[in-house]
Image (spheres, helix red, strand yellow):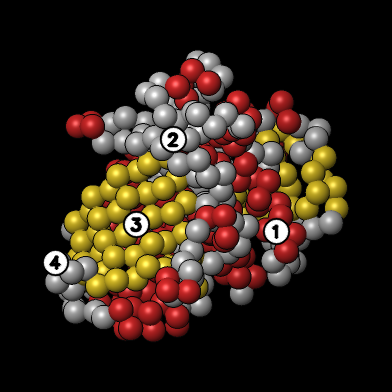
């Protein structure tokens, strides 16, 4: 029989995209059970062309479930993924709760698919969308040239913060629309947007960029920046990879971008890098700037590949490439990668 899948957090930003993805991929699942907080229980959502009633998160909700995907806050995953496992499910978790646990694999199918089977806790973690948005491309280059150092600046979309991000950005843009003098005097945008109290952004994002993503940790680093470092090392299996990241929120609804400065053990030309990336099945090279060809979030949102453009050999750094990478943070950055991991587990369970 086909395995039973539970989607926990079915009504959230990633959960919504997950239902679209499950409706369009080859169908490996028997029952798909939708689980959410008690507040959302009873809602009916469409998946695979059928309406399915959302059930409340409870231990019994996992009975008979083979694979349970979690798209919920860290503390909810920390509590409930082990409960799902105790009821017999394999948990695929998209929160930060287990990513750095040495007994939990952190999987990107393009980089380390076999680690899906190494799950002593019955839990497999899905990376943070910022790291994940560049992993297919970096994994392919690492296999050929040996990645040694990674310096990135992110340009992160607001849907990475959940549904409150786009809601606030649309409100701010409505508030500033049509005012053709805004952005010319310090503080004018701050006055024009709705009160920041209650905003998910720490500063206005309309006509602005904000160099804060996630929460503030030690020594001035934000959690998103530390995730890029820790998770890149774990996924690529390079514990001593040198990484430095600056994560910035930009007024984009969906699709994260990264300016990547990557140093390799071996020399690598632009032509060689293009050939490697072209051969990577889930990477698309868009790199002909003379003809206006380069990736932008607005042009790739809603699609699955990792897009790479502006590939250059760094002028002053040996063995180093600079490039610009875009990936839909809700698809490959979250729901799609989780679905791909779950499908690897399903294949194993039905083998
Ligand atoms: C963000 N990477 O963009 C985070 C979401 N997990 O906020």
Q: Nearer the viewer, mark 3 or mark 4?
A: 4
Characterize the local packing of mark 3: few (<14), some (14-19) or many (20 or more) Cα atoms within 10 angstroms.
Answer: many
Does 173 appear above or below 142? above
Can residue 181 be seen here? The reply is: yes
Label whose residue precedes the other's in the sequence (3 or 4)? 3
Query: Residue 244 location, x and y as percent?
Result: 23, 50
- Please give the residue where the numbered disc 2 appears in the rendered image: 208
Position of 276 compared to 347: left or right?
left
Assess whether mark 2 and mark 1 are in contact (beta carbons under 8 angstroms).
Answer: no
> Which residue is labeled 4 in the image?
316
Give the SS element for disc 3. Answer: strand
Badge 1 is on which residue? 22
Q: Could you give the CA–CA distance between mark 1 and mark 3, rounded to whole angstroms?
A: 31 Å
Mark 1 and mark 2: Cα distance apart in space: 35 Å
Tags 4 and 1 touching, CB below 8 Å: no
Q: Residue at x 80, y 35 (%)?
A: 43
Q: How many marks?
A: 4
| Residue found 70% across the figure and 58% down from its top | 22
């Amino acid at each position: 029989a086909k395995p039973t899948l539970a989607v926990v957090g079915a009504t959230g930003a990633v959960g919504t995209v997950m239902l679209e993805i499950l409706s369009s991929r080859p169908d490996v699942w028997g029952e798909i059970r939708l689980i959410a907080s008690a507040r959302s229980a009873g809602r009916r959502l469409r998946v695979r062309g059928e309406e399915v009633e959302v059930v409340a998160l409870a231990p019994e909700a996992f009975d008979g479930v083979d694979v349970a995907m979690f798209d919920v806050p860290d503390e909810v995953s920390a509590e409930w993924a082990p409960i799902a496992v105790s009821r017999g499910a394999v948990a695929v978790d998209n929160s930060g709760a287990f990513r750095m646990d040495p007994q939990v694999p952190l999987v990107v199918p393009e980089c380390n698919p076999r680690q899906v089977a190494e799950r002593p806790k019955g839990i497999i973690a899905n990376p943070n969308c910022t790291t994940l948005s560049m992993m297919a491309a970096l994994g392919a280059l690492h296999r050929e040239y040996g990645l040694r150092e990674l310096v990135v600046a992110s340009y992160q979309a607001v849907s990475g913060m959940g549904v409150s991000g786009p809601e606030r950005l649309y409100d701010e843009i409505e508030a500033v629309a049509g005012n053709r003098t805004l952005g010319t005097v310090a503080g004018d945008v701050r006055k024009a947007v709705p009160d920041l109290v209650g905003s998910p952004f720490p500063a206005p994002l309309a006509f602005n960029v904000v160099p804060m993503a996630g929460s503030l940790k030690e020594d001035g680093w934000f959690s998103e920046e530390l995730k890029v470092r820790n998770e890149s090392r774990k996924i690529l299996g390079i514990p001593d990879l040198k990484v430095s990241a600056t994560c910035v929120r930009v007024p984009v609804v969906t699709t994260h971008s990264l300016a990547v400065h990557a140093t390799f053990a071996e020399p690598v030309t632009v032509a060689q890098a293009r050939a490697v990336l072209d051969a990577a099945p889930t990477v698309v090279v868009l790199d002909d700037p003379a003809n206006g060809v380069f990736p932008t979030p607005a042009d790739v949102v809603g699609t699955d590949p990792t897009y790479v453009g502006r590939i250059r050999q760094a002028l002053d750094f040996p063995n180093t490439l600079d490039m610009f990478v875009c990936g839909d943070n809700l698809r490959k950055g979250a729901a799609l990668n989780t679905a791909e991991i779950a499908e690897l587990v399903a294949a194993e369970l039905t083998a």
